[in-house]
């Protein structure tokens, strides 16, 4: 086995170095994974731009797929070398109240970030990483690595959809047709919903239709709530998923949702914009508003099953594929906006 690995290390805002680091050894309950693909998420873009203040030098990346290389001692897992796996980022303890009740995303005793040769991070943008065995889930061997890397974002969508308890025949409006918005479209369709997409970009509206959306609207062409009701027999939506982080989208959600409906604030907004709500509107309409961030282990399992069975097909959302050596170029392009997922391969 190799003794060193390549890693894309962010050393300063908008500066990446490809470093040679020692391959870490798995400890008790851990596995070593030879990683093959890492998709670039908003989190990595914010670290690259210096907006999200994380330690330098750092090796990030959390949408990862690869192959089990080695299993550490006392590892209670069915995983074995050669298994294709996807990884779920998170330093969850597995023992606190929230982890024990299935809400590890709210873990109150998170472990610190690992370090390798003075570099801090999750190490998704590296050839190898060590993870706890319960942070990895097996996927089909014939699932391409660049598609398998979508398991983490799909798992976040799965958590949201399960929390919303989307029912057969309900009308779901997804606001925003970026990568996460379109993954919400796919999963909502699997739940049996009629999906309408609200998006200002005409090319993204077209992409939503190509992926099976029932209809699309342009929120700049007229009141979004009225447009939805024209497409829905005069009713507001049963579910509204806000998959873009801006105040106007949140305001539109309140106008789109129907009585007894549910609003999911799926995307975070930077900077945060306050949302003013009349409490009597909530009282009389019976709507509820919730949020979803991250995923639990069960969600990652479900995402792995959906991808392995090709029930969710993320290939149309891969904008481009870059080798690890071109990580800075890929991060710069992703941070410029207007792309779907860019994927690094190693």
Image (tube, rainbow, N blue to C red):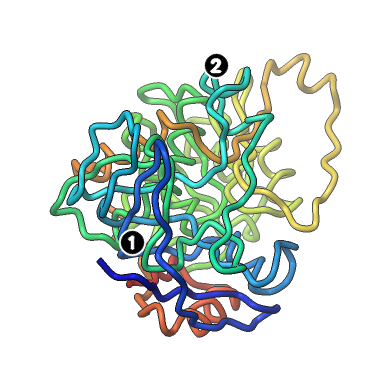
Q: Are marks 1 and 2 in contact (CB under 8 Å)?
A: no
Q: Where the N terminus falls, by quadrant?
A: bottom left
Q: Does residue 188 appear anywhere in the picture? A: no
Q: Kindly identify the residue that appears in the image at 85 percent across and 27 percent down.
A: 278
Secondary structure under badge 2? loop
Q: Does residue 111 appear anywhere in the picture? A: yes
Q: Earlier in the sequence, mark 1 or mark 2?
A: 1
In the visual, does 85 lie left or right of 242?
A: left
Packing grade of label 2 (10 A; few <14, some 14-19, many >=20) is few
- Looking at the picture, how far across and down is residue 21, in whole percent? 47, 73
Q: Residue 329 carries which label?
A: none
Q: Kindly identify the residue that appears in the image at 23 percent across and 32 percent down.
A: 78
- Looking at the picture, how far across and down is residue 341, in whole percent? 43, 66
Q: Kindly identify the residue that appears in the image at 68 percent across and 74 percent down.
A: 49
Judging depth in this view, the residue of 58 and 45 nearest the camera is 58
Q: In this view, does 87 lie above or below 210?
A: above
- Looking at the picture, how far across and down is residue 252, in whole percent? 69, 44
Determine which residue is flagged by label 2: 101
Q: In this view, does 106 lie above or below 285?
A: below
Packing grade of label 1 (10 A; few <14, some 14-19, many >=20) is many
Q: Kindly identify the residue that appears in the image at 41 percent across and 76 percent down.
A: 6
Q: Quadrant of residue 319?
A: bottom left
How far is disc 1 from disc 2 in space, using C-alphas? Answer: 30 Å
Determine which residue is flagged by label 1: 35
């Amino acid at each position: 086995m190799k003794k060193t690995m390549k890693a894309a290390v962010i050393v300063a805002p908008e500066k990446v170095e490809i470093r040679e680091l020692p391959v870490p050894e798995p400890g008790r309950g851990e596995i070593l994974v030879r990683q093959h693909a890492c998709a670039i998420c908003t989190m990595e873009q914010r670290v690259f731009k210096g907006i999200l203040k994380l330690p330098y030098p750092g090796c990030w990346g959390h949408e990862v797929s690869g192959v089990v290389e080695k299993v550490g001692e006392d590892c209670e897992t069915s995983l074995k070398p050669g298994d294709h796996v996807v990884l779920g980022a998170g330093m969850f303890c597995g023992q606190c109240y929230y982890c024990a009740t299935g809400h590890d995303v709210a873990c109150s005793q998170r472990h610190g970030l690992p370090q390798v040769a003075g570099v801090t991070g999750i190490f998704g943008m590296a050839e190898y990483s060590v993870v706890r065995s319960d942070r990895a889930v097996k996927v089909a061997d014939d699932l391409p690595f660049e598609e398998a890397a979508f398991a983490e974002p799909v798992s976040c969508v799965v958590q949201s959809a399960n929390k919303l308890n989307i029912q057969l025949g309900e009308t779901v409006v997804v606001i925003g047709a970026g990568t996460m918005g379109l993954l919400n479209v796919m999963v909502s369709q699997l739940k049996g919903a009629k999906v309408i997409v609200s998006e200002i970009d005409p090319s993204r509206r077209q992409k939503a239709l190509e992926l099976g959306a029932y209809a699309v609207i342009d929120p700049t062409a007229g009141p979004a709530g009225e447009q939805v009701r024209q497409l829905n027999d005069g009713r507001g939506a049963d579910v509204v998923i806000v998959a873009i982080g801006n105040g106007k989208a949140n305001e539109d959600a309140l106008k789109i949702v129907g009585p007894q409906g549910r609003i999911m604030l799926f995307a975070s907004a930077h900077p945060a914009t306050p949302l003013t709500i009349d409490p009597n509107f909530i009282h009389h309409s019976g709507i509820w508003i919730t949020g979803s961030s991250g995923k639990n282990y069960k969600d990652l399992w479900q995402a792995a099953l959906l991808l392995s069975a090709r029930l969710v097909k993320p290939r149309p959302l891969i904008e481009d594929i870059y080798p690890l050596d071109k990580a800075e170029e890929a991060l710069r392009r992703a941070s410029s906006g207007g792309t779907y997922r860019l994927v690094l391969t190693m």
